[in-house]
Amino acid sequence: MDVVPLIDRIGESPTAALFGLITGVIFGVAAHRSRFCLRAATVEFARGMMQDKVAVWLLTFSTAVVWVQGAQLLGLLETADARMMAVPGSWSGAVIGGLLFGAGMVLARGCSGRLLVLAATGNLRSVVSGLIFAVVAQMSLTGWLSPIRDYLASLWITSGGRNMDLLAALHLPREAGLVIGLIIALLALELSRRNRIGFSRLVFASGVGFAAAVGYGLTYMLSQSAFEPVQIESLTFTGPSANTLMFFLDRNAGLEFDVGLVPGVVLGSFLSALVAKELKFQGFEGPTPMRNAMIGAVLMGFGGMLAGGCAIGAGVSGGSIFAGTAWLALFCMWIGGMTMDWAMGGRGQPATI
């Protein structure tokens, strides 16, 4: 696909924002229809169940891996220079940030991506939590919390000035990434069969993972055609939430992929909920859930920025390119989420979204 005519017509920055919008719309529709949620999968697993929420998460993750790794093998994509891979990663940030994010998403009853999807359907709890998340993420990036984040992240970083490529570190051939994705996909499909998940939900769960591949593909094409350097990136909501917030607060802020991504998710989720007739206002059920949601949003905002990505950014986008710190952060998010669920007395209870 030649994107030069589009760049010549509207410019590089608007093109990047448009690509973010497209990626966000695909994610928003697919995430809403599949009810994709890392928090729900984590809680379900913590309570000793391997049901539909775990199956949907595994299918999303495996789809992202298969599409991204397959595109690389075909020469359609090169993720070695992706933003997450091209800079040093933080092992300490992945551990501490991942644990904080995991605990926070259980308190807030949804990871940052899920909150954004729910906010578009009229869930006021998610609107409040999402705004707090974005503010804290911005504070952690350039504000009062940034010195703490910098200190914790610097405790243990990857060597060589880059993140660790897990496949290369394990001396595995590039085809191994695709094989790993296919194995996880088979596990996900078997779980889906056992739990009698409908075909439509499976398609949309795969669509969430496909959106991550679309983001990488579009930004890669732009990087090959643009005059100015363009970062190869995909779905993530920690940095983009902060950047989108600043875009609307600072008239000097420019358009970029991140700024198109968040509105795209809102638009896609809203249209999906409209078609499904699921638009309705929902608030907090009481003071305790409100308190938990606010604390959880703070933990996710700081934890996601420290970990180098949220449940989507590290867990799907980063995982699909086998970034070492992303896989560690994802593992710690599961541990943090499971621990918080156990601490809240969730064992033995049904897992709800």
Image (cartoon, rainbow, N blue to C red):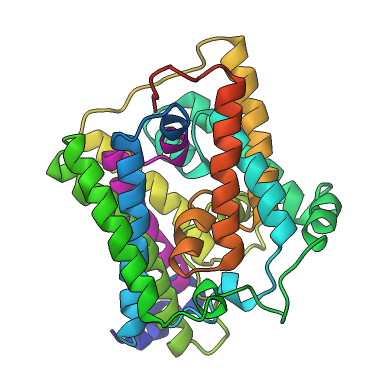
Of residue 274 and residue 27, the one placed in the foreground of this image is: 27
Q: Position of residue 249 (x, y in %)?
A: 66, 49
Residue 113 visible in the shown view: yes
> In the rendering, at what x and y percent does residue 298 appear?
68, 36
Q: Residue furthest top?
A: 286
Residue 27 location, x and y as percent?
35, 52
Give the quarter of the figure containing the N terminus.
bottom left
Badge count: 0
Q: Position of residue 215 (x, y in %)?
A: 40, 67
Q: Is residue 337 magenta?
A: no
Q: Residue at x 57, y 60 (%)?
A: 326
Q: Is residue 7 left or right of residue 287?
A: left
Judged left or right of residue 11, residue 211 is left
Residue 25 on the magenta span = yes
Q: Nearer the viewer, residue 211 or 267?
A: 211
Quarter of the C terminus within the rendering? top left
